[in-house]
Amino acid sequence: MVKIEVETPLDKFREFIILSTCRSFIPDELYMDRDVFPERETGVGPIYVEAEDKVTVKKIGEISFVKAVNVLGVIYESKSGNTKLRWRQTRDRFGKLNGEASGNSIVNLITAGVINKSYVEKVLNTEKSPSKNGQSNTDDTGSNKPQ
């Protein structure tokens, strides 16, 4: 798991969600409309778009495609539960993305342009760097030690 804390445009996070959930079956006209987002009901792997106004335009399987006006936030959780990300608007279509991402999600975040490889390397190096007491924050397997 990699901790994610970045500022990113909503369009890039939307692209990540599509890559992670429905790229193989989203209709082209919905994919091209930057105001349409995939949502998944609560339960396993919920995806929720918080907006001033939204309407469902199509449902395919477990994914509903919603057209959203003035998106305030987006909550994404993978079906496995290994990725939990939250985007919050800071201005217009720009916001802060926070949470934790699995290896598969990291690949999709990079592909979507949300983060780059150097960001991941920096975060991983920070996690392995010595803590305040001079000892490594990780054990031999790379897992975090309790502080």
Image (cartoon, rainbow, N blue to C red):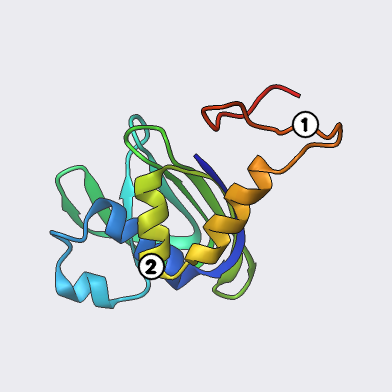
Residue count near mark 1 (Cα–Cα under 10 Å), binned few <14, some 14–19, many ≥20 = few
Which residue in the structure is indicated by mark 1?
A: 135
Disc 1 element: loop
Label pair 1/2, CB-CB below 8 angstroms: no
Nearest the eye: 26 or 136: 136
Q: Nearer the viewer, mark 1 or mark 2?
A: 1
24 left or right of 89 in image = left
Q: Amino acid at mark 1?
A: Gln
Q: Work out whether mark 1 precedes mark 2 in sequence or the reverse, and give the earlier one.
A: 2
Q: Which residue is mark 2?
A: 112
Between 132 and 109, the one nearer to me in the picture: 132
- Secondary structure of the residue carrying tag 2 is helix
Q: Quadrant of residue 111?
A: bottom left
Q: Is residue 30 left or right of residue 112?
A: left
Task: Name the spot of residue 46 as percent of width and height, x first.
Answer: 38, 39
Q: Is residue 46 visible?
A: yes
Residue at 13 percent across and 59 percent down: it is 25
Whole-percent x, y for residue 122 in the image: 61, 57
Q: Callout 2: 10 Å neighbours few (<14), some, many (20+)? A: some
> At 86% across and 31% down in the image, what residue appears?
133
